[in-house]
Image (tube, rainbow, N blue to C red):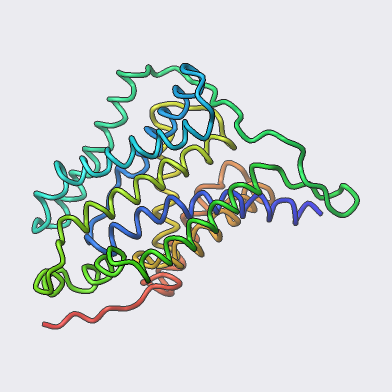
Amino acid sequence: MNFLTQLINGISLGSVYAIIALGYTMVYGIAKMLNFAHGDVIMVGAYICFFAVSSFDLPPLVGVLLAMIVCTVLGMVIERLAYKPLRQAPSLAVLITAIGVSYFLQNGAQLLWGSNNKMFPAFLTGDALSFLGGELRISVNTVVNVVVCVIIMLVLSWFTGKTKMGKAMRACSEDKGAAQLMGINVDTTISMTFAIGSALAAVAGVLYMSSYPILVPTTGSMPGIKAFTAAVFGGIGSIPGALLGGLLLGVIEIFAGSYISTQLQNAIVFAVLIVVLLVKPTGLLGKQVREKV
C-alpha cells in the first residue's frame, strides 16, 4: 500500500514537471534555444497569484488567470529583448543570456516582494478520495495535478496538429528558412511559442505551490532545473517526451526519497538522467537528426 501511495505522489509531482517541461521542449523544438529563465517565470506566476488572492481577495481562478496573463506578456518581452537579437548567435551566448535573465528575475522579485518566506494559500481543499477501504487515499491536489496535465497535453497536441499557428510552429521546427519562404512569420511564431510556454509555467507554478507552499524568489530554480531534466529525459523537442519524462522523473524522485534517502534524492534523479543519456543520447522519445554537411 505504501508503494501505491508513493507511486501516486510521484505521478502528481511528475505531472507538474511535465507541464513545466513543455515550455522547455517547445522553445527548443522551434527556436533551438534553451530558456533557463523558464523556472523563474514559474516563480513570477506564483507571486502574482499569491498577491491577487491574499492582498486583493480575488477568487483563486481569477488569480490563476491573472498569473497566466502576466507570465504570457513576460515571456514575450523576454523573447523580444533577450533572445531575438541572438537568433544567429552561438549557443553559448544564448545560454549566458538565459542565466542573466534568470538572475534578473530573481533579484527583481526580491526587490519587489522581499526575500521573506510567504505561505502560499491552500486553494485545493476538500476530502481526499478513499479506496481499498480507506487504506489508499488520493488528495485533491493529486487529482487536480493529473487532470490539468492531461487536459493541457491533449489541447496542446490538438493545437499543434490542427490549427494554423500550430502547423506554423511545426514548420518552423523543421526548417525556419523554408517556413519563411512559404509565407510563415517566424518572429510571430517564436513569440507565440514563448507566450504559450510562459502561460503554462504560471499554471505549473500555482500547482507546484499548492503542494509545496513556501514561496521565495528562488522558488522556481530547482523545479525549473528538474523540468529541464525531464524534457531531456523524455527527448527535448517532443511533447509526448515531456509528458513521459516528467512523470518518470516525479516517480523516481519520490521513490528515491522514500526508499533510499531524502538527502540523495536530487542526486539520484540526475544520476538516472546521466545513465539515460549515455544509453540513448536523444532521450526516450527523441529523434536522431542527421545534419547534412
Q: Is residue 110 left or right of residue 203?
A: left
Location of the N terminus by quadrant is bottom right
- Residue furthest to the right in view is 133
Residue drawn 16% across the image and 45% down it:
80
The part of the image, by quadrant, that contains residue 278 is bottom left
User: Could you tell me residue 61's position as x and y percent?
Assistant: 52, 35
Q: Is residue 70 left or right of residue 264?
A: left
Q: Is residue 7 left or right of residue 170?
A: right
Residue drawn 50% across the image and 37% down it:
206
Location of the C terminus by quadrant is bottom left
Can you say whether 165 is above or below 270 in the image?
Answer: below
Q: Nearer the viewer, residue 12 or 278?
A: 12
What count of labels does the image hold? Answer: 0
User: Could you tell me residue 289's position as x and y percent?
Assistant: 27, 78
Can you say whether 88 is above or below 20 in the image?
Answer: below
User: Could you tell me residue 208's position as x and y percent?
Assistant: 52, 40
Q: Nearer the viewer, residue 155 or 51?
A: 155
Q: Nearer the viewer, residue 240 or 60?
A: 60
User: Could you tell me residue 127's position as x and y percent?
Assistant: 77, 38
Residue drawn 53% across the image and 57% down it:
151
Q: Nearer the viewer, residue 187 or 116?
A: 187
Can you say whether 165 is above or below 86 in the image?
Answer: below
Residue drawn 81% across the image and 50% down it:
136
